[in-house]
């Protein structure tokens, strides 16, 4: 995101209200939490159903802002729900879509090539709202509950369907509320960044939306000056006293085909009552959650974790756009595009350990649009190099390199300071993590290797020998610190990681690359990282000397794990750098504390990691677990889930570390099917303050080295109870020869523990997320 953010310290189209007189007295009452079909389907004692029901967010007070209310989404269509501002007697259901953007490159990524707001519905009761009682049921990804007014009750169920990209809201009114109405309010089709930045010279606004009637289906058609359109279509159907609103959004560019698609989607969806639409939606979500499991004794943090798993699947899918900073939801924000200097990377880290690679849009997008990334550079470098600007549109077609954007890929040595050089390399580290967690060589061959080769080639154009015999970089930009610095640590760290990874990739793929000698030379001769008495500097001659939220000057520590606590010679540098960085108050933000938590976890300091997560929760996390810096930015809560992963398991450097950084208070913990590097699925349990058992299943037959954390003599058995040989390779560390599909169970010698997946008991009661009454 751009530097120097603000820190924390209508046109209405009324829908027919229905034949109110005909509905009076016919509403069929049902429970305030009308989920009988789903509840009946829950198997008794199912651990996933148990932890998810415990994590449900509740609202017994009306949410007044986006940061307080429920949210629904399927990575494309999204809705946030809260009181209509300034009204209080209507409920807003936002309608936003991650594909809807302005395509005018002449205004750059700040205004053109940015997300556009669509609009919202208001649910307007007959009477004044006196109470709400809502529950966001994570397992079913549905909002249920009641709105009570001085005239009656509205009982509702709402979902954004997983595959249909249709929002369905079913409302059953009591007598006195049968004449409630829905009103759609189209938004002006201009980037919400206009609330924070001046409109560019020469900017012409898109024309207003036009509402059309198509035989009972309403369509708000928004033409776009860049070509194409987006269309919001809706229809209300009444069945047995239950009124269901169906809403969809379609976007097309440059053709104007969105209207026909939206009308077709509403026609097929509205033919189904809510109870016929919901089962396929619920089935996907039930299967999604079962891919992994985590339970720990901190009730508030456990609930937060499962809400993040819900949130990331509501915001990301492999075939959806790479997440913008606010996901599929859009509110007033200076960040209405896709940011690549930290946000994207943090947004997707948790998908690896939680075993949700089906959400990996980064690997898909960089592979699909990789040819566009050379065009982000100045012409002399396009032949052999590639880069990614600080911000891009959803298809990586254009970014800040276009006129007026101001966020082009930086040019080393250029003055005044230019944006970052290393964003593509850092993004490719995410893709490399996907390779390492799946061992799918096609990811390495088709995405990591060809693109990383070009990203590193760009650096090599500027790398020069110094009088000290070392290779040096001219001045580049450390994300958002504000000055250019020669031998910038952000770039040196990424360059070193990139060269080492290219050599490994070439070996794995059997490629004899003519650039390999140059990569080896870089590893041998690259200048050391600039440090001073306070630890890592921004770059040569530029100390870390002010409060700064980014930890980009420390990437070699985390997430690259190139400078690690396991090397005693590096410990003082790591500790000094971490303490100096977080010691400056003033500009610290939420992801400062998630980064500090993960670095503490690398150091084996679980209590410190938990302390930093506690600071995050206390200072920044909102009632619905969202986060803001001037506007919605969702990378921080998602990266907090990764910090939890780092406390539970780390698998960098070819070693799987079990429970490396748990606070002493977490005497009980259960993890199941946690995905590690090497493509292993890990299950393990901690009981009575000790690791009881560890189970690893190999998906790829990769080398298996595990630091098991069990005390005393151990034994290793396969899934049938037969002993497996192992080799001790360090203190508490063993190597097990596992073939593809084989399983190993590590226990204390002679122990036969129960391997059942089950929740652990909470240490202390804790309030639910949302706005509970207490």
Image (cartoon, grey):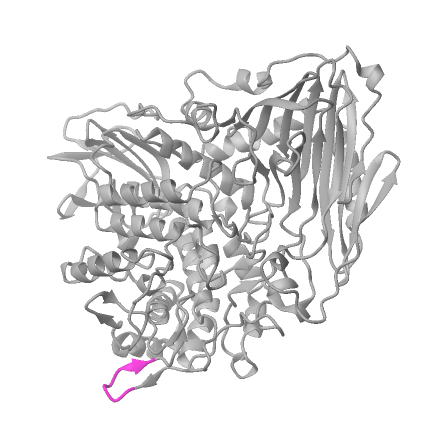
Q: Is residue 470 magenta?
A: yes
Image-based side of 616 in relation to 211, left or right: left
Residue 719, position as x, y percentages in the image: 30, 31
> In the current view of this chain or complex, which residue is farthest to the bottom?
467
Magenta segment, prevailing SS (helix, strand or loop): loop
Q: Is residue 269 magenta?
A: no
Q: Is residue 164 visible?
A: no
Residue 412, position as x, y percentages in the image: 43, 79
Q: Is residue 715 above or below residue 408?
A: above
Residue 743, position as x, y percentages in the image: 31, 37
Q: How many marks?
A: 0
Q: Is residue 624 above or below residue 531?
A: above
Residue placed most toward the observer, 300 or 646: 300
> In the current view of this chain or complex, which residue is farthest to the top?
25
Residue at 41 percent of width and 17 percent of height? 45
Image-based side of 679 in relation to 419, left or right: left
Residue at 62 percent of width and 31 percent of height? 159
Residue 673, position as x, y percentages in the image: 37, 36
Q: Is residue 43 above or below residue 281?
A: above
Residue placed most toward the observer, 204 or 225: 204
Residue 470: quadrant of the picture: bottom left
Residue bounds of the magenta highlight: 466-472
Quarter of the picture holding the C terminus: top left
Residue 152: quadrant of the picture: top right
Image-based side of 133 in relation to 124, left or right: left
Q: Is residue 655 above or below residue 493?
A: above
Q: Is residue 67 visible?
A: yes
> In the current view of this chain or complex, which residue is farthest to the right?
215
Residue placed most toward the observer, 663 or 130: 130
Residue at 40 percent of width and 27 percent of height? 767
């Amino acid at each position: 995101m751009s530097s120097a953010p603000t820190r924390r310290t209508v046109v209405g189209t009324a829908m027919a209200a229905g034949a109110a007189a005909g509905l009076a007295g016919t509403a069929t009452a049902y429970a305030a939490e009308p989920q009988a079909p789903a509840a009946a389907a829950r198997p008794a004692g199912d651990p996933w159903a148990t932890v998810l029901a415990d994590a449900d967010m509740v609202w017994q007070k009306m949410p007044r802002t986006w940061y307080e209310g429920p949210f629904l989404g399927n990575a494309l269509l999204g809705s946030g729900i809260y009181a209509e501002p300034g009204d209080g007697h209507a409920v807003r259901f936002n309608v936003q879509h991650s594909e809807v953007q302005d395509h005018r490159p002449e205004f750059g990524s700040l205004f053109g090539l940015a997300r556009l707001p669509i609009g919202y519905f208001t649910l307007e009761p007959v009477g004044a709202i006196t109470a709400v009682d809502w529950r966001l049921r994570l397992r079913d990804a549905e909002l249920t509950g009641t709105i009570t007014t001085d005239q009656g009750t509205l009982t509702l169920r709402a979902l954004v369907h997983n595959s249909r990209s249709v929002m369905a809201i079913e409302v059953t009114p009591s007598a006195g509320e049968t004449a409630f109405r829905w009103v759609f309010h189209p938004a002006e089709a201009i980037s919400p960044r206009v609330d924070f930045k001046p409109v560019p010279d020469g900017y012409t606004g898109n024309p207003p939306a036009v509402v059309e009637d198509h035989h009972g289906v309403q369509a708000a058609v928004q033409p776009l000056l860049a070509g194409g359109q987006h269309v919001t279509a809706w229809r209300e159907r009444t069945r047995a006293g239950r009124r269901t609103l169906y809403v969809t959004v379609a976007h097309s560019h440059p053709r104007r085909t969105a209207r026909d698609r939206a009308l077709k989607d509403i026609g097929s969806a509205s033919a189904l009552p809510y109870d016929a639409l919901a089962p396929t939606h619920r089935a996907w979500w039930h299967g999604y959650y079962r891919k992994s499991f985590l339970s720990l004794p901190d009730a508030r943090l456990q609930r937060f974790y499962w809400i993040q798993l819900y949130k990331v699947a509501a915001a990301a899918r492999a075939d959806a756009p790479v997440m913008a900073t606010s996901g599929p939801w859009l509110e007033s924000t200076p960040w209405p595009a896709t940011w690549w200097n930290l946000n994207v990377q943090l947004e997707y880290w948790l998908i690896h350990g939680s075993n949700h690679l089906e959400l990996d849009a980064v690997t898909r997008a960089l592979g699909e649009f990789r040819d566009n990334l050379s065009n982000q550079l100045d012409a002399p470098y396009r032949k052999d190099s590639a880069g990614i600007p600080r911000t891009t549109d959803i298809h990586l077609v254009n970014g800040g390199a276009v006129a007026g954007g101001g966020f082009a890929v930086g040019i080393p040595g250029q003055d005044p300071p230019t944006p970052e050089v290393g964003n593509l390399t850092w993004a490719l580290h995410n893709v490399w993590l996907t390779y390492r967690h799946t061992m799918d060589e096609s990811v390495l061959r088709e995405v990591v290797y060809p693109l990383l080769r070009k990203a590193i080639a760009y650096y090599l154009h500027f790398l020069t020998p110094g009088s000290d015999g070392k290779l040096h970089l001219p001045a580049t930009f450390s994300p958002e610190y504000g000055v250019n610095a020669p031998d910038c640590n952000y770039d040196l760290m990424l360059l070193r990681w990139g060269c080492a990874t290219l050599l490994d990739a070439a070996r794995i793929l059997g490629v004899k690359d003519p650039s390999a000698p140059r990569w080896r030379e870089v590893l041998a001769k690259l200048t050391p990282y600039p440090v001073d008495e306070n630890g890592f500097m921004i770059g040569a001659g530029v100390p870390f000397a002010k409060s700064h939220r980014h930890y980009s000057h420390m990437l070699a520590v985390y997430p690259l794990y190139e400078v690690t606590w396991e090397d005693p010679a590096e410990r003082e540098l790591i500790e000094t750098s971490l303490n100096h960085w977080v010691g400056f108050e003033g500009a610290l933000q939420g992801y400062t504390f998630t980064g500090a938590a993960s670095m503490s976890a690398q150091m084996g300091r679980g209590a410190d990691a938990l302390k930093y997560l506690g600071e995050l929760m206390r200072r920044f996390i909102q009632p619905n677990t969202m986060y803001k810096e001037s506007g919605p930015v969702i990378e921080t809560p998602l990266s907090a889930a990764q910090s939890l992963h780092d406390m539970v398991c780390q698998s960098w450097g070819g070693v799987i570390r079990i429970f490396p950084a748990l606070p002493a208070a977490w005497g009980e913990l259960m993890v199941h099917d946690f995905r590690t590097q090497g493509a292993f699925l890990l299950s393990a349990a901690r009981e009575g303050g000790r690791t009881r058992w560890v189970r690893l299943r190999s998906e790829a037959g990769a080398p298996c080295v595990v630091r098991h954390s069990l005390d005393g003599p151990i034994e290793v058995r396969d899934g049938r109870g037969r002993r497996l040989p192992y080799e001790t390779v360090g203190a508490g560390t063993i190597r097990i020869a596992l073939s593809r599909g084989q399983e190993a169970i590590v226990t204390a010698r002679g122990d036969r523990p129960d391997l059942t997946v089950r929740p652990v008991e909470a240490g202390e009661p804790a309030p639910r997320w949302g706005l509970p009454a207490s």
